[in-house]
Image: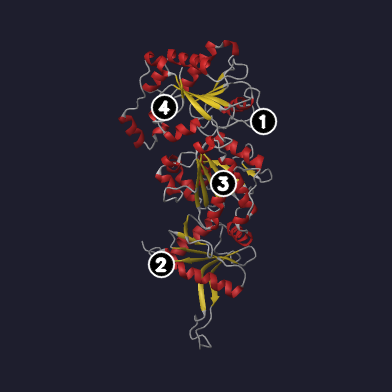
Amino acid sequence: MTRTEAQTRSELIDNQLAQSGWNVKDPTQVIEEFDILTPLPLGVAEPRTPYEGHQFSDYVLLGKDRKPLAVVEAKKTSKDAALGREQAKQYCYNIQKQLGGELPFCFYTNGHEIYFWDLDNYPPRKIVGFPTRDDLERFQYIRRNRKPLTQELINTSIAGRDYQIRAIRAVLEGIEQKKRDFLLVMATGTGKTRTCIAMVDALMRAGHAEKILFLVDRIALREQALAAFKEHLPHEPRWPNVGEKLIAKDRRIYVSTYPAMLNIIRDESQQLSPHFFDFIVVDESHRSIYNTYKEVLNYFKTITLGLTATPTDIIDHNTFQLFHCEDGLPTFAYTFEEAVNNVPPYLCSFQVMKIQTRFQMEGISKRTISLDDQKKLLLEGKEIEEINFEGSQLEKQVINKGTNALIVKEYMEECIKDGSGVLPGKTIFFCSSKAHARRIEEIFDKLFPQYKGELAKVLVSDDPRVYGKGGLLDQFTNNDMPRVAISVDMLDTGIDVREIVNLVFVKPVYSYTKFWQMIGRGTRLLEATKPKPWCTEKDVFLILDCWDNFEYFKLQPEVVQL
């Protein structure tokens, strides 16, 4: 069906404006066929036709002060929206000439595609929906009051290391050059979150951003990010406060998991504008996140910063494309090697001990995921790294009772201990399934009954007792016991417990990205100002690898012989 321009407007564009809160029939909000006076041609004193010396803009959107905020130029659906581009631009400049005041924002659409042109600032870009009146007034306020970012001081008490300052400068300079997508590659433990908070602080002080979204991929990381923003930017209101489910529109810093934000943008009763945020941080931004949550990133098109700890040489090229680093170079990179070799070091290096020589004969075969299974998983849209071992043949091998008892005994002998030399230092066991994790917990309790069930605890993400004050994660981080956190997926990425001195891989890992994230759980150095009695020094940590993971990824770490 081909629509005329009038039909396109009444059937499509009027509704799209209404979705963003614009009532086309209310002349205090929207004026249709807005009359713009233009100079007559040279030598013509009087208009020769009724329309000479006039232009008519399809829609002009008004601010609360009744002054024009934006021009919307409509084309019929069968035409390319871009045909309205120059026309809309002329209307904006002519309105400013006629009325004085600020330059209106420029939109052009054919009812199917909407383009937003922030004249004198950015080239046109395609958007999902029109901004609300509040959005446009915020854009206008930012445009009027922002200061040059190159002169903005960085708060070095939030992020003061030389590489953190270089990372922030690289992004701020890029924003000044009108770039909109950035990717920081920083080894786990080098302070990605703090770097990001110091950057947000600079953007807010310079008047470039009022509303920030920080996206994470699990609840524990949301809690961690909220705590970090509270510590470093205590006066900026945050969402969510404890117990808040519905989005509140009066905050400045929003921290959310991808699924929670997806639910909000799909929930018509919550009505969150696609232009609500000025700056978005995508934590651990790699391909699997993009595949699953593309909708979130496509909905909010604004200045976006990706953070990842994945080493540059193995970042998926799609991730580079996602952040428009077409040449395969991130905005800024800081590697694990640079951090360990800095004087003084910023990260802790590790030694590896292979346990499996002792129990290979116990019947654990080498890692096996048949090619058929791999194909099946890929067809289901899963990454190899997301494999669920529950109930598989591999789990039956991994979960073998005798084998796990050997691993636990070996670990208790060889692990890095606390100052007493008796109890193990803080440790994570990476298990293949919940059943496997529970089995290992049982073995600890059986072999070491003197610790009354407190030494080792299972932490899995779907257990509500894990979270919040006094929860298992809080106990593991801040109390003497438990010393061992037995985890399936939850502690693989992003949990910061500086006192971890042992990591035990009791499962095969198939993703290099995930493997480095898991190793990153141990790389943080202690904070001199906040000593914990169970870990007073840490200059190296120990990885017990039961599954030849280092060989699988062709890594040659420093190996300690048993």
- What amino acid type should be assigned to the residue bearing mark 1? Lys
Q: In the rendered view, would you say 287 is above or below 39?
A: above
Marks 3/4: CA–CA distance: 36 Å
Viewer-nearest of labels 1 and 2?
Answer: 1
What's the image's color scheme?
Answer: secondary structure
- Front position in the image: 354 or 480: 354
Q: In the rendered view, would you say 384 is above or below 25?
A: above
Measured from the top left, where is residue 90 in percent x and y? 50, 72
Q: Which residue is under mark 1?
A: 530
- What amino acid type should be assigned to the residue bearing mark 3? Leu
Marks 2/3: CA–CA distance: 40 Å
- What amino acid type should be assigned to the residue bearing mark 4? Asn
Q: Which residue is under mark 3?
A: 213
Q: Quadrant of residue 163?
A: top right
**Identity of the residue drawn at 44% across and 61% down:** 111
Q: Which residue is under mark 2?
A: 4
The local secondary structure at tag 4 comes to helix
Q: Which residue is under mark 4?
A: 549
Is 373 situated left or right of 462 in this image? left
Marks 2/4: CA–CA distance: 64 Å
Q: Quadrant of residue 479?
A: top right
- Residue contact between numbered discs 2 and 4, judged by CB atoms under 8 Å: no
First in sequence: mark 1 vs mark 2: 2
**Identity of the residue drawn at 40% across and 63% down:** 77
The local secondary structure at tag 3 comes to strand
Q: Residue furthest left?
A: 372
